[in-house]
Image (cartoon, rainbow, N blue to C red):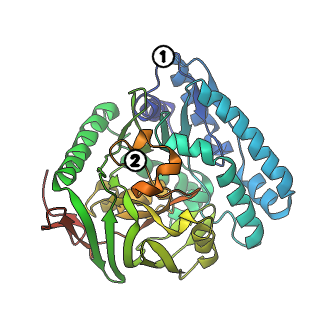
Amino acid sequence: MEREQLRKYAELGVKVGINLQPGQPLVIGYGDRQVLPEHVAFAQVLTEVAYEAGASFVQIDWGDEHWKRQTVAHGSLDLYEERLKWQLEWVERMAKEGAGFLAIPAADPTLFEGIDNERVTRATRAKDAIFRDFTDRRTNDLYSWTLMSMPTQAWANKVFPELPEGERVEALWKDILFCTRANNDNPVAAWQAHLKNLQNRADWLNRLHIDTLHYTAPGTDLYVKMAHYHYWKSGASETAAGVPFVANMPTEEVFSAPDRLGVSGTVSSTMPLNHNGTLIEGIQLRFEQGRIVEAHAARGEEGLRRIVEADEGSHYLGEVALVPVDSPISKNGRLFFNTLFDENASCHLAIGKAYSLIEGGRDLPFEEWEAHGLNRSMMHVDFMIGSAELDIDATTLSGATVPIMRKGRWTEEV
């Protein structure tokens, strides 16, 4: 990748994703989303761009997936957990300084294949538990944060097995730049226009005052009651201090919070899910009074059970997100085996933690979330359910039925 293009992509992450403010620190990599060896050049450019934008300090947390796989398979998990706690101390120190947090998710989709399930479960749950409080504050937008990815050879091998190995990384780069609009002559302007369009869609849904969504598709007949006083949100976020940022790059979704006890029926996934190095395919869930009472997968069922059984809240949904099948990423037709990209090609649901998308939600103490219909969990795992066979109808608070999607496409232009 040419340095000029790498710099353009880095500027997008710093200026639009984080929207770094003068004097603000920047953390690149945290938790299990450390900066991998193949991302060194990009991290260096990010550092340069951040300091040019006025960063007071740039912290990079380096990692290595080979080390991670070998350690989870053979190392002392007690010491692994202690290392995670040490990582958290520095993250919390930077959070107190008002840092922005940028991660580069690009995990090998098969990282933990063949490793003892109990060891993988312990390692992943330890990370989720140790970073839970920080993750709660970050996803509640107390800090600016963004996810933006770049290739690794292992990831590219999974996405482009039909190409010669030497061409796979470059092919994945091209798709990433397309999906993030970074190949545009003016990526920042392109993002501003895109976010405006997403906000128009969220505004339309908010005007409907939806009570319940009904999803129908092969293997899916699901009712989702929305949380009281919920609102729909686009990819644009804002910190508690009023600084705008974009958490996901790319983003094509509008999303909101379901009532944790208001989900019933069945749903089937339409795309594989790569979660913590385990590939899960053919997910089928059944809900009663919000709770997952049956969970199956055609492949990777143990990985699915690790998600659902992580804690009490992981038996419920925390997010509903709507993405049309004619979005640019969907039309690209590429299966990325990476949730950051695949969720933006498909309607999806999230098992676990909600976002505080109800009126006054940001200031609501976490211990009061459930009383307002918001789900609490250490997990937040998106799985894709969209397709050209998906229909969605809304029942409004006034009792009207409004078609939202037909065959995976919006029913109304905005």
Which residue occupies 45% across, 35% down?
9
Which residue occupies 67% across, 29% down?
93
Task: Say which of 108 and 222 sits in front.
Answer: 222
Q: Is residue 143 visible?
A: yes
Instruction: Give x and y (percent) for residue 365.
Output: 49, 43
The answer to whether residue 288 is left or right of residue 72 is: left
Task: Say which of 343 and 128 sits in front.
Answer: 128
Distance from label 1 to label 2 (Cα)?
25 Å
Instruction: Give x and y (percent) for residue 62.
Output: 70, 39
Which residue occupies 38% across, 39% down?
182
The answer to whether residue 285 is left or right of residue 264 is: right
The three-letter code of the residue at mark 1 reads: Pro
The three-letter code of the residue at mark 2 reads: Pro
Among the 4 quarters of the image, the one containing residue 83: top right
How would you rate the neighbour count of disc 1 (Cα within 10 Å): few for under 14, some for 14-19, many for 20 or more?
A: few
Instruction: Give x and y (percent) for residue 28.
Output: 60, 35
Q: Is residue 305 above or below residue 358?
A: below
The answer to whether residue 348 is left or right of residue 73 is: left
Among the 4 quarters of the image, the one containing residue 270: bottom left
Q: Tag on residue 22?
A: 1
Instruction: Give x and y (percent) for residue 138.
Output: 52, 40
The answer to whether residue 122 is left or right of residue 257 is: right
Tell me the element at label 1. loop
Q: Is residue 160 visible?
A: no
Task: Say which of 307 and 103 sits in front.
Answer: 307
The residue indicated by pointer 2 is: 250
